[in-house]
Amino acid sequence: MFDKVLVANRGEIAVRVIRTCRELGIATVAVYSELDANSLHVRLADEAYALGGQTAAESYLVTEAILDALARSGADAVHPGYGFLAENAPFARAVAAAGATFIGPPASAIETMGDKISARLAATRAGVASVPGRNEPIADPSEVIAFGESDGWPVTIKAAFGGGGRGMRVVTGAGDAASAMESAQREALSSFGHAEVYVERYLTWPRHIEMQVFADSHQNAVWLGERDCSCQRRHQKLIEESPAPDFGDELRRAMGEASVRICRACGYQGAGTVEFLYEDGSFYFLEMNTRLQVEHPVTEMLTRLDLVEWQLRVAAGEPLPLSQDELASLSRGHAIEARINAEDPSAGRFLPSPGKITRLRLPEGFGVRSDAGFESGDTVSQYYDNLVAKIVVWGHDRDAARRRLLRAVSEMEVEGVATTRAVIQEVLTHDDFIEARHSTRWLEERLDLSDIAAVPPAGGPPHEARSTRDTGSTDGVEDMVIREVDAEVDGRRYRVKLWVPDTAATGQPAPRSKRTPASSRRRAAAAAVLVADGTVSVPMQGTIIKVLVTEGELVEANQTICVLEAMKMENPICADRAGVVRNLRVSVGNSLGAGDVVAVIG
């Protein structure tokens, strides 16, 4: 086993890995951007090193900075978590070249399955059918149109690298092909560093079912059960469950065996997830994620196995702890996970909601697990994923698990940012979900979210936790306290204690972090805010990635003025009236805060 593991990630998954390492007696190393200097994963790790920068491109995606932290810390292994560099073959090779173990599959397997086109070819070699589509990148919108006209609309343009719904656009007709392809390529490049996209058929009412797999270096490969991830918006999952409802054992076994064949076809090792679309009794290979999934706790709740521990043991060269026959008897009951994201779901728009979490209380109780990367007082940044917490429950059957999750989500308290809690409650109480009639398109096409109101920001100053101890009074040093503070020396983070005057006793105000005024933290129920004078402003923090109009141009109502990227999502900022653009105040690359003006329509 390893002596020290560097976790090359942030947030909830970094916390998750650190906790398992601690249980196994393995020291941990955190890395952090400037914005994450006081984050929970940094506070929990044994050591922490600064990467510099604010955005992911300036920090968590900089291989050289992470390798520098690896060298200075002396860690003998790197766990990439999910996202960022988790499915980056050159990074896996760089870690190995530095003398450390990459806790993940071989770089060759990452390359094969990370490229969705070569993954489709690997599935074909394994005898597993893929969603009908092109097996080569597309270079021009005319190819999208040709595919749609021959195979039928709608079609899906997808990033050839990466996953999680990034770089994916649904095209309903020829007129949308060019803009959809451009948007997919731009998001794919931003998220994964590759702009290649391909096209495949968009199934009409499919379910998204994935299979958890594990393989070791001793020629063993197993499947640990499926997860139904059909409840999605923007092609990103909100609720996952296992076992999949209305999914027979024969079908489950066929999908599991197909997943193992795909593992063997690419020489896989470690944890992975093989994803399928299921419709009308048939399943089609979609992609393989060569890492631990966000929703892995669903499988852990059913099997009572720590999958991060399995990752560590397999990476250390140990054989899989259990055989396929032994795994068959482990799963009992039903598990469901809800993702609580920092998004304002009012009227079903799911607008990003970055900001400071002024209060966070996670649910507890029998059969409830909460995985979070934040605590009260932490900030959800516009530059990273918006996952605040995952609430996972177990029940003796599906309805018991559903009712337990409903109770747990209702107990959860989040203030300071809007979240998806209200949507989770709507889903869990809807007859379509209760009777398993939903699909990947159900939430956006059938679920009525028009009554969900915008969540106002929490008022009042944020709570500031302090670690102090009164030292008593002596001549000349009365009213002194010991405070724990964080210091950074040569890029390494330390927590030190200082003996300082008690500012509360001396009447001097304690230092406080800057707060965004309530007026600029307001939540909007539209993709742009237009006031009486024709001023168009943005409803959230973000970066302008595209400007579609020029000053003096005549625009129509609902015409897109610019595109704002926030929390890895593109948000069109539209005019709410027809008129002339009298004052265009933004250009590509501008960073904006909630309420900032982009244009005036006169």
Image (cartoon, rainbow, N blue to C red):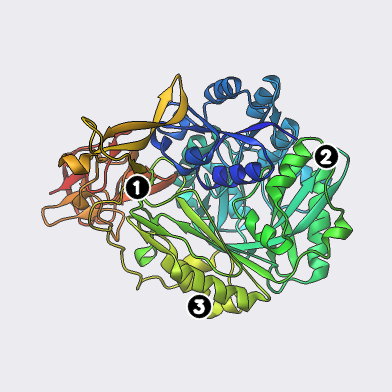
Callout 2, which amino acid? Glu
| Residue count near mark 1 (Cα–Cα under 10 Å), binned few <14, some 14–19, many ≥20 | few
Percent coordinates x, y for residue 397 in the rendering? 67, 76
Callout 1, which amino acid? Ala
Cα–Cα gap, marks 1 and 2? 43 Å
Mark 3 lies on residue: 429
Identify whether 247 is placed above or below 264.
Answer: below
Q: How many marks?
A: 3
Mark 1 lies on residue: 465
Percent coordinates x, y for residue 402 in the rendering? 58, 74
The quarter of the picture where residue 562 lies is: top left
Mark 2 lies on residue: 318
Locate the N terminus by quadrant: top right
Near-viewer residue (263 or 324)? 324
Label 3 vs 1, first from the N-terminus: 3
Question: The residue tagged with tag 2: helix, strand or loop?
Answer: loop
Near-viewer residue (16 or 259)? 16
